[in-house]
Image (cartoon, helix red, strand yellow):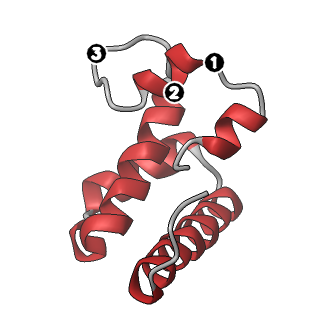
Amino acid sequence: MRYAGARHAGVTEAKIAAIDDETSDLLSPRERAAIRFAEKLAVDHRKVDDALWSEMRRHFSEAEIVELVAHATLYIGFGRFNEIIGIEPA
């Protein structure tokens, strides 16, 4: 379920597998920054530090960062909501 949207958008299985592989060259530095940022938001948003903000600003405009935060937190919230009320992933 976690990667269903990526598959639907045509992302290859190899690229999906690369999400968890820091050594893979299938993801760009911009994509890696977004993944690190989203993971920090999901696990402990208080650990989004100045270094990560600087990295994000090297790769994204302020508007893009706002959009990433909005989407990431929305989907994190949906995931937690589903878990709390017992909805199983499709």
Mark 3 sits on what residue? 23
Mark 1 sits on what residue? 12
Q: Is residue 48 visible?
A: no
Mark 2 sits on what residue? 16
When asked about the image quadrant of residue 12, the answer is top right
Residue 54 location (% of width, % of height): 38, 52
Residue 82 location (% of width, % of height): 50, 78
Q: Nearer the viewer, mark 1 or mark 3?
A: 1
What's the residue at 37%, 67% (across, down)? 41
Q: Nearer the viewer, mark 3 or mark 2?
A: 2
Give the Cα separation between the discs numbered 1 and 3.
Answer: 17 Å
Give the Cα separation between the discs numbered 3 and 2.
Answer: 14 Å
* Mark 1 nearby-residue class (10 Å; few <14, some 14–19, many ≥20): few
Above or below, comparing residue 67 to residue 21 in the picture: below
CB-based contact (under 8 Å), mark 2 and mark 1: yes
Query: In this orientation, which residue lies closer to the viewer: 76 or 51?
Result: 76
Indicate the secondary structure of the residue bearing disc 3: loop
Query: Which quadrant, please, contains the C terminus?
Result: bottom right
What's the residue at 43%, 78% (across, down)? 80
Query: In this orientation, which residue lies closer to the viewer: 82 or 11?
Result: 82
Amino acid marked by disc 1: Thr
Residue 87 location (% of width, % of height): 52, 76
Indicate the secondary structure of the residue bearing disc 2: helix
Residue 31 location (% of width, % of height): 52, 34
* Mark 2 nearby-residue class (10 Å; few <14, some 14–19, many ≥20): some
What's the residue at 27%, 66% (across, down)? 43
Please report whichever mark, 1 or 3, sits nearer to the chain's N-terminal start: 1
